[in-house]
Amino acid sequence: MRITLVSTLVATAFSLGACNSSRTESPVVAAAPAALAPVPAALAYSGPVLGPDGQCQGGATGTATAIEPGIGECDLVRLKGKTPTDVLVGESGKGQREVQVLYSEPGGRELYFFVNNRLDRVVK
């Protein structure tokens, strides 16, 4: 019985000591929501672009004389002299306009990749 009484007194002393503690904890504060990146007012490309039907939307006023990196989508169609076989228009996760233009030629397929209305690469 003496062990039980001593155990009870020790437990009571510890619990009372915890109530009289001078330790303070800061209140839990909800974190503020992360700020969203501003949406650009204008897209990062200029000039006429291709629609999903392969037709140039806007006046094709390009001056490119060769198919090379950096030319516009409508310049490619003007230089090729015919409508593409297929056009895929989309947007990247970075907010960039991405276009894939396919030409099925007798010698094989040519795939042109555009980013923001500029030829990025060609796969033949």
Image (cartoon, rainbow, N blue to C red):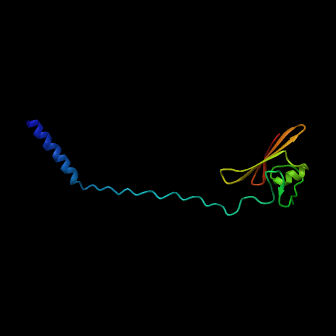
Q: Is residue 120 visible?
A: yes
**Furthest-bottom residue in this view:** 41
**Furthest-front residue in this view:** 53
The percent position of residue 112, horizontal first and vertical second, equals 80, 46
Q: In screen coordinates, is 18 left or right of 3?
A: right
On-image quarter of the C terminus: top right
- Image point (65%, 50%), residue name: 93
Q: Is residue 9 above or below residue 73?
A: above
- Image point (81%, 51%), residue name: 53
Q: Could you tell me how many numbered marks the image carries?
A: 0
The percent position of residue 59, horizontal first and vertical second, equals 85, 61
Q: Quadrant of residue 105?
A: top right
- Image point (78%, 53%), residue name: 118
- Image point (24%, 56%), residue name: 22
The percent position of residue 63, horizontal first and vertical second, equals 88, 58
On-image quarter of the N terminus: top left
The percent position of residue 38, horizontal first and vertical second, equals 61, 61
Q: Is residue 35 above or below residue 16?
A: below
Q: In screen coordinates, is 9 left or right of 19?
A: left
Foreground of the two, 57 or 32: 57
Q: In screen coordinates, is 34 left or right of 58?
A: left
Foreground of the two, 99 or 52: 52
Q: Is residue 71 visible?
A: no
